[in-house]
Image (spheres, grey):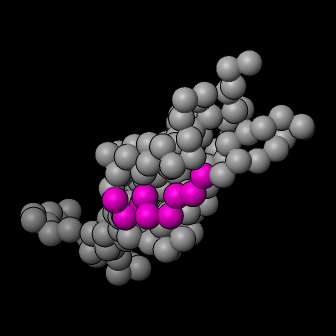
Amino acid sequence: MARTRGRRARSPGGEEGSAAAEFVMVGALLTVLTLAVMQLGLALLVRNTVLDAAAEGARYAALADSGLGEGAARTRELITASIGPAYATDVEARYGDYGGFPIVQVRVVAPLPLMALFGVDRGLEVVAHAAVENLR
């Protein structure tokens, strides 16, 4: 019986180095998947922040001693403080009607982030409503 020291038996398929290649491919796939999930989370954060600022601006404009300009300014202020001024460029407030009751609508059009905070210009549009207060 002959002994061979330090020699490995070669695999018949010639798969030397395949573990390293598989590690790189799986690592790249998991990295892309992780970044995609993080980007989706960022897009949802931006959407929810803009929607919340629009709702707060609509409530502010609907107060009895407030007006549309103040509500739009409040919305711009909240978006600028939370995300940045690039997201607060297109904000408009107007009066409307819902079921016979007066309401305030605040509409915000902002970029939709697709790659970090860069993305489709005017890709996100949210509208918030609030019932108008009066002192009668």
Up/down of 132 relative to 51, above or below? above
Up/down of 22 relative to 14, above or below? above
Q: Which residues are magenta?
A: 85-93
Going by the picture, which residue comes out furthest to the left? 5
Which quadrant does the C terminus fall into?
A: top right
Q: Nearer the viewer, residue 44 or 134?
A: 134
Q: Position of residue 87 (x, y in %)?
A: 42, 60
Left or right of 50, for residue 30:
left
Q: Nearer the viewer, residue 30 or 114?
A: 114
Residue 125 in sight: yes
Going by the picture, which residue comes out furthest to the right? 99
Question: Residue drawn at (32%, 73%), measured in percent from left and top?
Answer: 21
Total numbered badges shown on the rendered structure: 0
Which quadrant does the N terminus fall into?
A: bottom left
Q: Position of residue 55 (x, y in %)?
A: 58, 39
Going by the picture, which residue comes out furthest to the top? 136
Q: Position of residue 2 (x, y in %)?
A: 16, 66
Q: Quadrant of residue 103?
A: top right
Residue 92 lies in magenta, yes or no?
A: yes
Residue 20 lies in magenta, yes or no?
A: no
Question: Residue drawn at (61%, 60%), measured in percent from left and top?
Answer: 125
Q: Nearer the viewer, residue 23 or 95?
A: 95
Residue 29 in sight: no
Q: Quadrant of residue 74?
A: top left
Question: Residue drawn at (38%, 70%), measured in percent from left and top?
Answer: 118
Left or right of 26, for residue 56:
right
Question: Residue drawn at (41%, 79%), measured in percent from left and top?
Answer: 13
Q: Position of residue 101 (x, y in %)?
A: 83, 34
Up/down of 33 relative to 68, above or below? below
